[in-house]
Amino acid sequence: MKTLEEVLDEITPAPDPDFVADMEWRMRRGFPPKRKRRLPSFGARPVVAVAASAVLAVVVAVSLTGESDEPAQPQPAIDVAESAPLVDEQTAGRSVAQPVPPPFPGGAIAPGAEVRRIERSAALTLASEPDEFDRLADAIFRTADRRGGFVLQSSFNQGEEGFSSGFFDLRVPSDELQPTLNELSRLATVRARSESGTDVTGSFVSIRDRLRTALALRTSLLRRLELAVTDTAVRAIRRRLEIVGNRIGGLRSELRGLRERTEYASVVVEVVDEDAGAVAGETDEAVDDAVGSLEDILNFLIRVGGVLVPIALVGGIGWLLVARARRRARERALA
């Protein structure tokens, strides 16, 4: 029969020799504390470099995000007749001329244009005696003709005592505008004179480019019509040719009108009766004086009212207080 000590010796596991050796080494050294691992120490320059790199990365990310958030620039609108494809199933595989894309619209002022297109106009008011109107009208016609222009329209207004006013609408070459105005100013007394100019180069260039695009598209459609082999394709191309033809006609009309307005200046001449103008001027002065007097009176009344109204309010409030005090005094006396 085994004793308890023998049984315990049998079931007790034998320790690992390495573990026993490590424990004995620690016992001889008095079980020293374990050292904590420290992170490697870097200098100040690497830290600054890492921080700068992080800031730079953030700036680049923000800038890229800002650029992506910007709305896309609007593209120029292209007409359906210009953007539709020119190759169909009947002409597939053949060499077909493609339409020329429309030019990108530039600025309204067309800064790169070599020749500026200026629309000029002027207005002139001449005062003369009524019996001089016929002579003055003939002189205006001769001046326009001598300067290479013409009178577009003219009219006269006649009163009881004869001619009272006249109107002339002239067209003269733009480079002859100043000489024409100077010559007209010497015909009679000048009551008023004005001039104006508008740069329409941007509109002129835009219309001209659209016309060129429409002409190129019509040429392309004509070539495609020669290659069409079915009645359906022929009818479709002819419909598009009609649309483009109408557009070409409208653009040519706009360009011609704009060219005429820039090559010829408009001069409006008004002839008035010198005496009627003087009487009208005196009447206007009298009306202005009367209106000025009424304004002065109204301003005076406003100032007086601004002083009297507060005084009247204060006096009325004081009278009410005094009357109330007297009434109470009488009531106490009667009581």
Image (tube, rainbow, N blue to C red):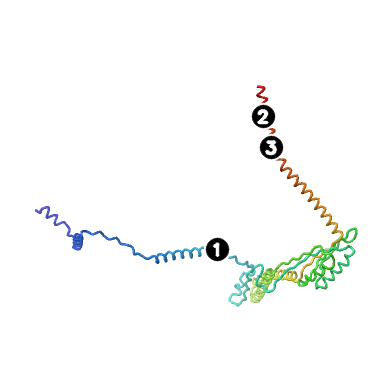
For badge 2, the amino acid type reads Ala
SS at mark 2 in the image:
helix
Asked if the residues shown at circle 1 and circle 3 are in contact, with their CB atoms under 8 angstroms apart, the answer is: no
For residue 116, above or below residue 334: below
Q: Position of residue 158 (x, y in %)?
A: 88, 60
Which residue is found at the position 37% from the left and 66% from the top? 43
Q: Quadrant of residue 311?
A: top right
Q: Position of residue 123 (x, y in %)?
A: 79, 65
For badge 1, the amino acid type reads Glu
Q: Earlier in the sequence, mark 1 or mark 3?
A: 1
Q: Position of residue 133 (x, y in %)?
A: 88, 65
Of tags 1 and 3, the one toward the viewer is 3
Q: Earlier in the sequence, mark 3 or mark 2?
A: 3
Give me the C-alpha separation between circle 2 and circle 1.
Answer: 78 Å
Q: Which residue is mark 2?
A: 325
Q: Which residue is mark 1?
A: 70
The 10 Å Cα crowd at callout 2, few under 14, some 14 to 19, many 20 or more, is: few
Q: Which residue is mark 3?
A: 314
For residue 165, above or below residue 329: below
SS at mark 3 in the image:
helix
Which residue is found at the position 64% from the left and 76% from the top? 227
SS at mark 1 in the image:
loop
For badge 3, the amino acid type reads Val
Give me the C-alpha separation between circle 3 and circle 2.
Answer: 17 Å
Q: Position of residue 206 (x, y in %)?
A: 67, 69
Asked if the residues shown at circle 2 and circle 1 are in contact, with their CB atoms under 8 angstroms apart, the answer is: no
Give me the C-alpha separation between circle 1 and circle 3.
Answer: 66 Å
